[in-house]
Image (cartoon, rainbow, N blue to C red):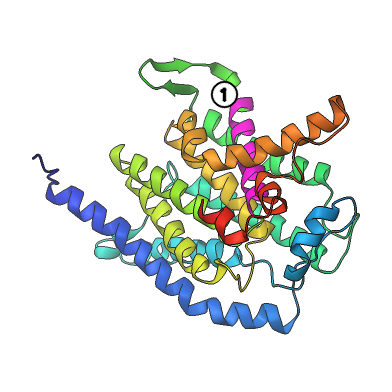
């Protein structure tokens, strides 16, 4: 039997990642009651849309009023820890804090910036939905959301292409290929598609959080094997926060992730895939996201082409609910 043996530097890196994941979990758990109290006090609950979606409305009417915007826990903790240890490293660079800083221009500055920018857009969208401001029950229109997140993704593509001079893609078992400026639309597509796929999965208690936990765990391992320690620690921080979030989000959920959680985490997951040059593994790592978004696309196409639906309700998890599956069964399977 062969055992994997790590040297001291690798053991330090692993403990670094796990330590930050644990710290993130503890901090998120510590301030969750305060956020939960705030959400309940000001009745920042989810509004269930009924127009044009009778099956969805029937299945989820009981969830109306459950607080949303729980995603603040995840990106808020990540932002605080990144800035805190960056600041500590600045004032005491020759101490242990100099080694614990994981905010770097080449690895984590862009994903952190995209995480926060997307989160703020999602927060505005959630608030508009809560207060029923906007069409179809409140919130930003789809075309406006698509435009805003595409702009965020385009900025990320610009950063990769011109700032980091990145125009290579890696195809497993084949090699690296220079695709020039085609890297920009590819980057934008990966980020936007991943963000909206995560948003589609955020429909059942614990579903999106569980899928994201596995996905960020996979990219933490990939980043570690590539020697991208800052990126691996960044994933570790998100994992810790996700674990704490899931503590309160599994059925029956105390609050939901909301657009302020789903969209930025999807954008960030897409950036992880591009930074590790493992975007071709993303459909495999996040195959549930592919199923969810794929079912929505198929539903739209079937109504347009053959004039009827192929699913009782879309995305797929709502179809399974409509078939009679309990919510916990859908999520666990």
| Picture quadrant of residue 61 | bottom right
Q: Is residue 319 shown left or right of residue 274?
A: right
Magenta extent: 185-202
* Residue depicted at x 46% and y 39%: 285
Residue 315 rendering spot, x and y as whole percentages? 70, 45
Q: Is residue 196 magenta?
A: yes
- Quarter residue 15 falls in: bottom left
Nearer to us in this view, 42 or 290: 290
Residue 266: where, in percent of width, then height? Answer: 58, 47
Q: Position of residue 153 (x, y in %)?
A: 64, 39
Asked if residue 101 is among those painted magenta in the image, a careful observer would answer no
Label 1: how many Cα within 10 Å (few below 14, some 14–19, many 20+): some
Quarter that holds the N terminus: top left
Q: Residue at x 44, y 49 (%)?
A: 214
Secondary structure of the magenta portion, mostly?
Answer: helix
Residue 231 appears in the picture as rendered: no
> SS class of the residue under badge 1?
helix
Q: In this orientation, does residue 61 appear?
A: yes
| Residue on which the image places disc 1 | 183
User: Between 2 and 144, which is closer to the camera in this rendering?
Assistant: 2
Residue sitting nearer the eye, 74 or 197: 197
| Residue 272 picture location, percent across and down | 47, 41
């Amino acid at each position: 039997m062969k055992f994997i043996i790590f040297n001291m530097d690798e053991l330090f890196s692993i403990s670094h990642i796990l330590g930050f994941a644990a710290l993130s979990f503890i901090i998120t758990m510590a301030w969750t009651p305060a956020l939960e109290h705030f959400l309940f006090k000001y009745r920042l609950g989810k509004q269930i849309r009924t127009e044009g979606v009778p099956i969805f409305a029937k299945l989820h009417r009981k969830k109306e009023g459950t607080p949303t915007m729980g995603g603040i826990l995840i990106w808020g903790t990540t932002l605080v820890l990144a800035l805190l240890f960056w600041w500590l490293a600045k004032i005491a660079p020759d101490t242990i804090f100099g080694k614990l800083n994981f905010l770097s221009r080449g690895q984590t500055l862009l994903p952190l910036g995209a995480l926060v920018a997307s989160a703020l857009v999602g927060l505005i969208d959630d608030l508009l939905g809560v207060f029923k401001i906007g069409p179809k029950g409140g919130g930003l229109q789809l075309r406006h959301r698509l435009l805003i997140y595409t702009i965020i993704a385009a900025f990320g593509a610009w950063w990769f292409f011109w700032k980091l001079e990145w125009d290579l893609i890696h195809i497993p078992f084949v090699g690296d290929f220079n695709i020039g400026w085609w890297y920009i639309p590819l980057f934008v597509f990966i980020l936007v598609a991943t963000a909206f796929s995560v948003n589609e999965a955020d429909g059942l208690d614990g579903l999106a959080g569980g899928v994201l936990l596995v996905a960020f765990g996979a990219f933490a391992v990939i980043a570690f094997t590539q020697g991208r320690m800052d990126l691996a620690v960044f994933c570790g921080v998100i994992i810790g926060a996700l674990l704490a979030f899931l503590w309160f989000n599994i059925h029956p959920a105390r609050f939901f992730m909301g657009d302020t959680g789903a969209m930025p985490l999807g954008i960030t997951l897409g950036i992880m895939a591009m930074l590790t040059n493992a975007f071709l593994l993303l459909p495999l790592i996040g195959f549930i996201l592919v199923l969810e978004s794929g079912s929505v696309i198929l539903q739209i196409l079937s109504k347009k082409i053959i004039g009827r639906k192929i699913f009782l309700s879309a995305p797929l998890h709502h179809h399974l609910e409509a078939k009679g599956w309990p919510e916990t069964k859908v999520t666990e399977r």
